[in-house]
Amino acid sequence: MSVFASLVERLADLLQPLFGASAAAAAIVLFTALVRLLVHPLSRAAARGQQARTRLQPKIAELRKKHAGHPEKLQRAVLELHAAEKVSPLSGCLPSLCQLPAFFLLYHLFSSETIGGRANELLTHQLFAAPLGGRWADALGAGGPLGGAGLVYAGLFAVVAGVAAFTYRRTKLMTAARPVLPVAEGEQVPGLGAVTKVLPFLSFFTLVTVAVVPLAAALYVVTSTTWSAVERAVLYR
């Protein structure tokens, strides 16, 4: 933890001439961008996997007709098809999973009052008027939604809402282009219809995350979410 704190502090020192008192916040944004660059090859692999899974849909539809009423045989046949085509059903989860350690490091770093037995100096840093270790509830209690810290969160919420609306529209279009395939004539996979309806709204849950985590972790989430929206628009165009 102390090594990670030193890294953030060094980045903040480098950015201080450009960003002044908000240098630590800029360092977190830069750190997030570096993490996303490292994860980008996995994102490209996930995009290729999604395209491959889309190409397999006609074959999977044939398997569903062939093994209608035998879910165990269907599952085994689908797994064998993925293995034969060298397509991993879980490849799309890897980019998100690989980012979790970085997010939790930031969360813990800006939630701890001490690091290595001494006061956590990073908690003294701010993004404009909002402390990086504070939360939205603290901002509301300090000056209300129109106070200095409240306005910082209002800006973050506006960015997240804009990205979520963009992601929502793209997800709806992509879902409409890939209708749920039937298991048998006139029958759909149980539960998938509900999942398909809920999926476009998942991006809006980021608003809740930004509201409850420390501002430093919220910056990571906002930066990463924005990066994901742009990256997916390019890779899945």
Image: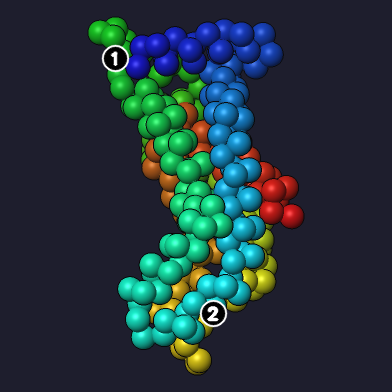
Please state, as top left, top right, bottom left or bottom right, where the C terminus lies in the image.
bottom right
Near mark 1 (Cα within 10 A), the count class, few <14, some 14-19 or many ≥20, is some
Secondary structure, mark 1, is strand
Task: Give the colour scheme shown.
Answer: rainbow
Q: Which residue lies furthest to the front in this view?
A: 84
- Kind of residue at disc 1: Thr
> In this orientation, which residue lies closer to the viewer: 230 or 106?
230
Q: Residue 62 carries which label?
A: 2
Q: Residue at x 37, y 22 (%)?
A: 109
Decide if residue 128 is in sight here: no
2 or 1: mark nearer the eye: 2
Q: Residue at x 58, y 16 (%)?
A: 23
Q: In the figure, 57 relative to 168: above or below?
A: below
Q: Where is residue 79 in the image (x, y as percent from the top left)?
A: 43, 62
Please state, as top left, top right, bottom left or bottom right, where the N terminus lies in the image.
top left
> In this orientation, which residue lies closer to the viewer: 164 or 44?
44
Q: Where is residue 155 in the image (x, y as percent from the top left)?
A: 60, 41
Q: Residue at x 50, y 92 (%)?
A: 186
**Marked residue nearer the N-terminal end (2 or 1):** 2
Q: Position of residue 33 (x, y in %)?
A: 60, 29
Decide if residue 102 is in sight here: yes
Q: In which quarter of the image is residue 142?
A: top left
Q: Which mark is residue 75?
A: none
Q: Residue 114 carries which label?
A: 1
Left or right of 97, for residue 24: right
- Kind of residue at disc 2: Glu
Secondary structure, mark 2, is helix
